[in-house]
Image: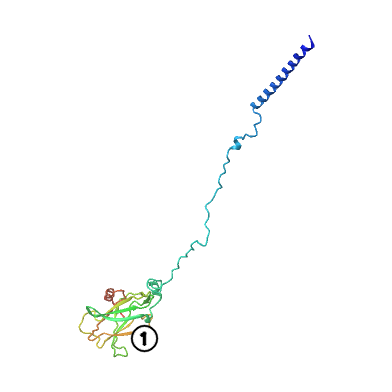
Amino acid sequence: MSVKSALPSALSSSAVLLLGALALTACQSGSTEAAGGPAPSHRTSAAASAPTTVSPPTTEAPVPTASATTAPTTAAPQTKPMSGTGGGTDTDAYAWKHPCAIEQLTVRVTARAGAPTQRVIAVRNNGGQACGLSYYPRVYLDSAKSADGTRAVKPRVPGGLGGPPAYPVHARQTAYAVIDLDPSGATTGTAPGVDELNVLPDADHMPAAATESFPLGKGALVLRPKLGLYRTTVADAVASMKSADTQL
């Protein structure tokens, strides 16, 4: 063999070996990537790319606080006794503890229509508070010319009465009592010369000096008179008078 022919053959074999080594290296590199090698830097994992959801903070209903625009709390009004009708000083309970004063009363005596022997005694409370009277007025019949009361005649009244409470008269109301000068209807009286009716609205609390006198009128006859209790109506006062059975 000549030297020239052997050299090209050797070079060809080396080239073949070098190409084979490069091909093997390339195959190993591709196999490594396909087997799950490190991911390129431009990729993003699913966990990193998923959005994060933040739960809202728990809130409670705000507590209202006082401010300049808040309406002020109004206190309940206190009940006070009234001086007029309907108030705390115009009740039966108040009247029982507060006797009437003669200055707050007006007393009138009139003939009862249809009953010539009867007189209506009306006691009006002119004040703004209730007050109490005795069960009936103190009444006696006498002569205007008599100075010593020797001719005085006292009526019978309903019996069985106790002590207080007194009869209540509300503000600007009237209490009525009726006296019958001659319940028998006789035409002749047994008390000649008697011509006036004397009335003291409350003998339990008023002095005798507060007594008022009213003329009976000409021809009045007096025989065993009867007096009833104070009542709110004349009709009730008449009924009370008819039950009078106790002599004063």
Residue sitting at the far front: 4
Q: Is residue 128 left or right of residue 12?
A: left
- Which amino acid type is shown beneath numbered disc 1? Ala
Location of residue 241 (image quadrant): bottom left
Residue drawn at the location 79% of the way across and 10% of the way down: 2
Can you say whether 44 is above or below 155 in the image? above
- Could you tell me which secondary element the residue under label 1 belongs to? helix
How far from the left and from the top, in percent, is residue 33? 65, 27
Quadrant showing the N terminus: top right
How far from the left and from the top, in percent, is residue 78? 45, 68
Residue drawn at the location 70% of the way across and 22% of the way down: 22
How far from the left and from the top, in percent, is residue 194? 26, 87
Residue sitting at the far top: 1
Taking depth in this image into account, of 247 and 137 the one nearest to the observer is 137
Q: Residues within 10 Å of mark 1 (few under 14, many from 20)?
A: few
- Which residue is disc 1 drawn over? 209
Residue sitting at the far left: 187
Q: Is residue 228 left or right of residue 86?
A: left
Residue drawn at the location 60% of the way across and 36% of the way down: 47
Label count reads 1
